[in-house]
Amino acid sequence: DRTPADRDRKTGDHNPREQPMSNWLEKLERELDQRLSAFLSQNPFQAQLFKQQHLVDRARSLQHQRVHLQQEAKELRKQLLALAADVRAWAERTKRATRAGGQELSRRAEHHLNGLMDQGRSQWTDLADLGRRFKEVDQQLSELNRQQSSGVSSLDREWALFEAEQELEQLRRDAGLS
């Protein structure tokens, strides 16, 4: 027969006390959600502030993501440039070995060159993926800016747009894009 430790390993239930704790936390979370919903339904102004704060937090998170993606792309471009230099050097080495009659050395150099080229193709694919993710984040930011501006006075909207443009320009300067 199996020991209790074996049964726990088979079922993935390593801590029998974890289940009641999880239920307790779920109950607490449901209770807090219900209280928050009730409060917000009784206080529409607070509900509006809550929604606006959520949009601001989401926009901030997306802006951080955007900057991170820019930094990743910048680093990947540096790696691609270094790799391109390696490819050129190994292509030349392969030709030199072939011209000198070093067939074995030429074959090994060509094999290494093919590996570098595969690595380059992979990095180009990664860079394209970063570009797609960057575009998605940009679209989400645009949508959030549109949502944030709805319901705000024209002056407030213009001021928010001005501040967003200032922050965006600062992010570009910080990322070395301007």
Image (cartoon, grey):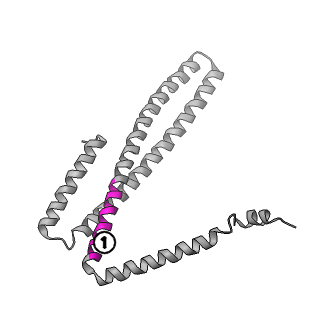
Magenta-highlighted residues = 46-63
- Give whichever of 146, 93 is nearer the camera: 146
**What is the x, y in percent for residue 74?**
37, 41
Image coordinates of residue 106 in percent, x first then y, are: 60, 23
Quadrant, the N terminus: bottom right
- Of the residues shown, which amino acid type is indicated by label 1? Phe
In the rendered view, tell whether residue 46 sits above or below residue 85: below
Residue drawn at point x = 29 percent, y = 76 percent: 47
In this picture, residue 37 sits left or right of residue 163 = right
What residue is shown at x 37% (from left), y 44% (from top)? 71
Q: 16 or 89: nearer the eye?
A: 16
Q: Is residue 123 left or right of residue 148?
A: right
Q: Magenta includes 59?
A: yes
In this rendering, the answer to whether 93 lies above or below 141 is above
User: Along the line of sight, which residue is nearer the eye, 69 or 2?
Assistant: 2
Q: Quadrant of the C terminus?
A: top left
Q: Is residue 62 magenta?
A: yes
Tell how many labels. 1
Name the residue beneath numbered marker 1: 50
* Other-residue count near label 1 (Cα within 10 Å), few / some / many at <14 / 14–19 / ≥20: few
Percent across and percent down for residue 120 are: 49, 39
Q: Is residue 159 left or right of residue 3?
A: left
